[in-house]
Image (spheres, rainbow, N blue to C red):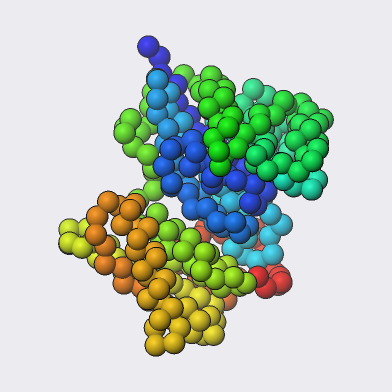
Amino acid sequence: MATRAGYVALIGLPNVGKSSLLNAFIGERLSIVTPRAQTTRERVLGIYTSDGAQMIFVDTPGLLEPRYLLHHSMLEAARAALSDADLVVLLLDATAAEPPSLPADVLGALRSRRGRAFVAINKIDAAAPGGIEALRAWARSELDLDAFEISALTGEGVDELRAALIGALPVSRFFYPEDDLAVQPVRFFVAELIRETIFEAYREEIPYSTAVAIEEFRESEDPIYIRAVIHVERDSQKAILIGKEGAAIRELGKNARAKVEAFVGARVYLDLWVKTLPRWRRNRAALERLGYPVPPEAKRRPGRKR
């Protein structure tokens, strides 16, 4: 029997539920999820294999108006996924007050993918009055597509969308072993879990000003030794993360360690450090050091702090 396989990009504005949908598709918690916008900074790839089909779902950063270099990196990651994928799912938020305003090039790319682009209205379990119909009308008028109605939270409609995607996949051999669930290495997901814990523990600018780098990962030890550095932009942020006599960083480490142990299925010694890397979100060299590629044409320009 011929198999089908392909890459499926999940795109949309920030906080529409792309990460939640990837997790629902895979059946595992690969992509971090918080109520805050702009949580996803890089493409996260999750693999679903079943019944002769393999889909590599690509969770992407939200389509936003870039205000500093990190935003340019995030937007480039989303555009690259849109360009490279075999299929694309545009996710819309049923709780939004109005239809989305998407970049013209994104709309053009979706319109050109006849038969390979899909629209899904998410959060139907919490939809605003008239929100679903307004988004269905927008999808028909802007993209000539009928939208799927789903809830990544409850699972409603997810199986129907998945079946439609499988039917549209190109005939192909599988790209990955059938039991693989993710493409990125374990240390990538460990860093993401630490970052998710920071988003849960802090408000205002702290989560957006932090980047996590895994500097040591000794899997042969028991417990597994992981040394992670949390980079911040200002010394005042470093002081907040560490807390009085180290209380805050210990609490953060305890909560993050529990998540990491559940993910790797083993005991973990999580050694957290905090370092100041001034203005790293706006500095090309710092971004590249932290693993965030920035397109050459991106201009460095001042933006409001977040």
In the rendered image of this protein, does residue 73 appear above or below residue 150?
below
Quarter occupied by residue 148: top right
Q: Nearer the viewer, residue 256 or 81?
A: 256
Q: Where residue 214 appears, x then y in whole percent?
A: 36, 65
Residue in view at x 17 percent, y 58 percent: 220
Give the residue furthest to the top: 1
In the rendered image of this protein, does residue 168 appear above or below residue 300?
above
User: In the rendered picture of this protein, how many numbered marks are placed on residues?
Assistant: 0
Residue in view at x 72 percent, y 45 percent: 95
295 to the left or right of 176: right
Q: Where residue 290 appears, x then y in whole percent?
A: 46, 65
Answer yes or no: is residue 290 visible: no
Q: Nearer the viewer, residue 89 or 150?
A: 150
273 to the left or right of 120: left
Q: Where residue 278 appears, x then y in whole percent?
A: 54, 79
Answer yes or no: is residue 28 visible: yes
Classify the position of the C terminus by image quarter.
Answer: bottom right
In the rendered image of this protein, does residue 303 appear above or below residue 220?
below
Residue in view at x 24 percent, y 59 percent: 267
Give the residue furthest to the left: 221
Residue in view at x 53 percent, y 23 percent: 163
Q: Where residue 243 appears, x then y in whole percent?
A: 45, 83
Classify the position of the N terminus by image quarter.
Answer: top left
137 to the left or right of 283: right
In the rendered image of this protein, does residue 103 appear above or below residue 180?
below
62 to the left or right of 174: right
